[in-house]
Amino acid sequence: MRLEQLTFSRFIAAMAIVIFHYGVNIFPFNNEYVNFLFKQANIGVSYFFVLSGFIMIIAYGNYDKVNPAEYLKARFARIYPLLALSVGLFIVAAFLHGGVNLTDILLNLSTIQAWIPGKATVGNFPLWSLTVEIFFYVCFPFFFNYFYKKYSIGVSIIMIVLVWITSIAAQHYLLHSSFYTDYSNSHSFIYYFPVMHLNQFLAGNLAGLLFIHKTPVTGKRYDILVILAIIGFVLLLKYPFGVDYHNGFLAVVFIPLILFQAKNRGMLTMLFSKKPFVFLGEISFGIYMLQIPVFMIMQSILLKLNIIEPIVVFYTSLTVLIVVSAICHIYFELP
């Protein structure tokens, strides 16, 4: 089942993360009325985790059983070629900026960096999330075969909600305990260790189960509900209340946002199901994976051309990133 209207949301999340890394002080993202959104836009990774869990249920919901070997083979074929390309480009970028750390490159290629405290963000640092995604993929056949297919949806929902609450409570406790210090191994463990993010993937699984079994009938217009979910998300970012949002807490708005987008047949779905928007969503993986090396390479080139104006550097690099991601999708990812 393809839900084209959801595909474009991946592009929005990927672009928000790029802006967080490189454009938060660039017009119009530095405007006082919207800057709070982009200063926290790395939360887009959490949206990816939840959406990934949802997509897995939608993709395999009609299966009696998931074959772990075939499933992992398909997942590997989906993510590793672009990962290898992104690391290759990062090597080029690192040489332009002074040199390459071989250990960092090997960790990026092995996708184990987030399992090692203090090493999660070495090298091409957004790749830490691939460690987490691979952990999700390894776990999914087990959850699908032995819980979702074996027990009722009610039991699955209770299990997922308990894991979600426990995970959020554990992270909140650790962040406010003597265990935690900024930018240390404890920081790396709390924010990047794959197990700490499992609740987000399971929250996406929950959204998928609700989509299949319990949500309103597909075919209705839910534009207003989609907009209300987005407003709820914005308000949570604008008025935080002491809860860290990188632990899966925002699943409370991501789940309804995903569900109502998936079920919606209103104007928003008609718009975002059009080919240009779907294509942008399809290249979002490349945008996320290639952002660091492309921006590093472009910064080196523009500096040699004596182009140093931040706004010019940002938008030039962003344009090149989108073009390169599109080319990679057509000529590298798809083949």
Image (cartoon, grey):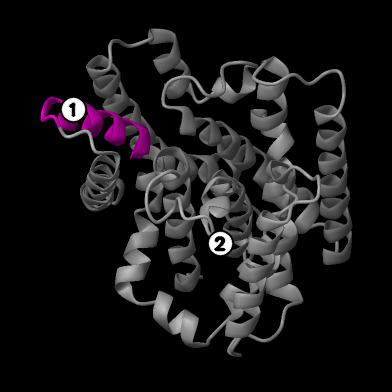
Q: Please name the residue that numbered disc 1 is placed on.
A: 303
The answer to whether residue 78 is seen in the rendering is: no
The boundaries of the magenta stretch are 290-306
Is residue 22 visible in the rendered image? The answer is yes
Q: Is residue 208 above or below residue 241?
A: below
In the rendered image, the vertical position of residue 8 relative to residue 288, given as above or below:
below
- Label whose residue precedes the other's in the sequence (2 or 1): 2
Q: Is residue 200 above or below residue 209?
A: above
Q: Is residue 5 left or right of residue 335?
A: right
Query: Which residue is drawn at the image coordinates 40% and 80% (left, top)?
Result: 271
The quarter holding residue 308 reads top left
322 with respect to 23 (left or right): left
Label 2, on which residue? 59
Local packing at callout 1 (Cα closer than 10 Å; few below 14, some 14-19, many 20+) is few
Q: Is residue 281 magenta?
A: no
Vertically, is 204 above or below 105?
A: below
Q: Which residue reaches farthest left?
A: 305
Mark 2 belongs to which amino acid?
Ala
Q: Residue furthest front?
A: 32
Image coordinates for residue 286, horizontal then vertical, percent: 35, 45
| Residue 294, position as x, y percentages in the image | 28, 35
Tags 2 and 1 touching, CB below 8 Å = no
Q: Which mark is residue 48?
A: none
